[in-house]
Image (tube, rainbow, N blue to C red):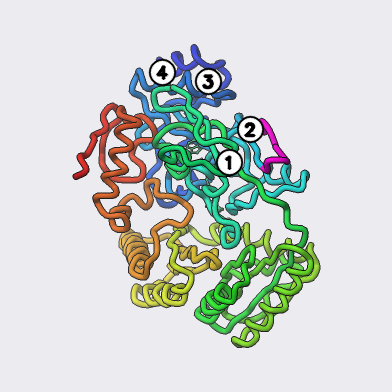
Amino acid sequence: MKSLGKDLRRLIPSDRVLTDPEDLVAYANDATYHVCPIGNPEAIVLPETTKEVSRVVRYAAESIIPVVPRGGGTGLSGGCTPTHGGIVLDLKRMRRIVEINQGNMTARVEAGMVTATFQEVVEKQGLFYPPDPQSMKVSTLGGNISTRAGGPRAVKYGTTGQYVLGLEVVLPDGEVIRTGSSCSKSSVGYDVTHLYAGAEGTLGVITEAILRLVPLPPARKTVVVTSAAVEDSARIVSAVIASGIVPAMIELISRGAAAIMSGSLPEPYPGGESHLLVELDGSEWEVDENSREIRGLCEGMGAVVRVIEDRRKAEAYWEASEKLYGMLLKMAKKGIVEDVTVPRDRIPEFVRAVSEVADRLEMNFDRGMMIGLSGHAGDGNMHPTIFFLRDVTEKEEEKAGRAIEELVKAGLSIGGTISGEYGIGIHKAEFIELELGKRQVDLMRCIKAAVDPKNIMNPGKIWIDGEAPGTCRTIAIQ
Ligand SMILES: Cc1cc2nc3c(=O)[nH]c(=O)nc-3n(C[C@H](O)[C@H](O)[C@H](O)COP(=O)(O)OP(=O)(O)OC[C@H]3O[C@@H](n4cnc5c(N)ncnc54)[C@H](O)[C@@H]3O)c2cc1C
């Protein structure tokens, strides 16, 4: 360890190489500290340029030392946890906006830029970068790209991957490549850009991105739709989507979650078992027309509709929703947030499956262990969350594991996917073959072996293989 620090300080100014135990501990895991194993970083490097990243990765490749890229460390799958030790590359000092091109509606940005900061800068120029993971005040563009992050606005605007036109990447041998371009379309060979979008740091380090921007919508309106049951809310989501109205966001808020948030709202959520928090955006006319249509449709389905005209009040609802996970974790001893996504017309079935699993495994408030359900309902991204309200026994931990497996399988059985936005990391690795099949996972292993034959880039993620850094098997695909 001593010599690793010494070697790295020859490559990077010494104040940006950390090896003290009190510094290392801050990089041992991401936001899954309740769920995934803790890592064991041996050195942290804070690069400021692509050249510095390249120098460190080249050295790591020659010395066969794992490299784990890290953005904001907000991941919820253990992606940036250094399970095999080695070097953590903290990219947050690489946060320059290289260019905003208004005529082309694109931006070139370094990967360590915090997402919300980037959004604020482009919005001042009348432009809009829609991807909005609820961690966006801390998470980085590089982390969002590497996990193909989504967020509430995905229902209308899609997820991070859809905004990435090109990347600068440091390959696992230290070479630097540029993928894609600033053009809005390109048809040149394999889509290497989108191979890196979602690669979770296993194929190289993203140092810069070319991002697509869209015009900033001039008007927004928030609507709260309250129903007597979660299934009713789920049916309303399907009906709204089928009606052709495309809200910018539709969040599912349970009664329990609404009660927790109501303390920080100017007007509490109305009484009712389940709520949808909806944002409409577009021109003034479009927003007014859509809110009238949504009111008619939802009231026709027995819901109570409240249109929040005051922008500041509306912001309070969205801010509370953004902070919900943190508020819940404060109240519980431990929380495990899941990320199953189902086709939007199958949400009612998934909602039923969640309550069936909770009933059968006796997970409820009185037992001190329950399953809450919220989610980005507009795109079918459900976040059933297991809360431990007190210290739990080993047996109860096992029960939580069983519940996760059953929820994942319930999602898959209705055409869903095991992760809509958090990625696989460590947390979902045991389920990847269940969704993709062995052949497709083997195809991914082949790509990994070809790009990173020494397996130094974020080893131990996406699939469980136990391969040590230094070797990466190519699996024959027949
Ligand atoms: C309260 C809370 C709310 C959240 N809400 C959402 C949400 O709404 N939507 C959503 O999608 N996610 C959400 N997340 C999860 C998380 O914020 C996202 O996965 C986010 O994209 C991670 O970004 P990050 O910068 O923190 O990346 P990190 O956690 O640092 O890393 C994530 C992965 O990306 C890799 N990586 C990071 N930077 C680079 C790089 N430059 N080059 C190559 N690989 C890199 C890491 O190795 C790791 O595998 C939430 C998390 C929390 C704690």
Observer-nearest of 115 and 125: 125
What residue is drawn where x is 43% and y is 28%? 171
What residue is drawn where x is 60% and y is 37%? 182
In screen coordinates, is 244 left or right of 394? right
- Marks 1 and 2 in Cβ contact (< 8 Å): yes
Q: Earlier in the sequence, mark 1 or mark 2?
A: 2
**Cβ of mark 1 under 8 A from ligand 1:** yes
Dot 3 alpha-carbon crowd within 10 angstroms: few under 14, some 14 to 19, many 20 or more: some
Observer-nearest of 277 and 263: 277
Task: Give the SS element for disc 3.
Answer: helix
Residue 140, labelled with which disc?
A: 1
Rendered view: 67 above or below 412: above
Q: CA distance from mark 1 to mark 3?
A: 19 Å
Task: Give the SS element for disc 2.
Answer: loop
In screen coordinates, is 136 left or right of 418? right
In screen coordinates, is 322 left or right of 460? right
Q: Earlier in the sequence, mark 3 or mark 2?
A: 3
Q: Position of residue 5 (x, y in %)?
A: 45, 18
Q: Which residue is mark 2?
A: 95
Residue 61 in view here? yes
Q: Earlier in the sequence, mark 1 or mark 4?
A: 4
Q: Earlier in the sequence, mark 4 or mark 2?
A: 4
Q: CA distance from mark 1 to mark 2?
A: 9 Å
Q: Which residue is mark 4?
A: 59
Dot 2 alpha-carbon crowd within 10 angstroms: few under 14, some 14 to 19, many 20 or more: many
Q: Give the amino acid at mark 3.
A: Glu
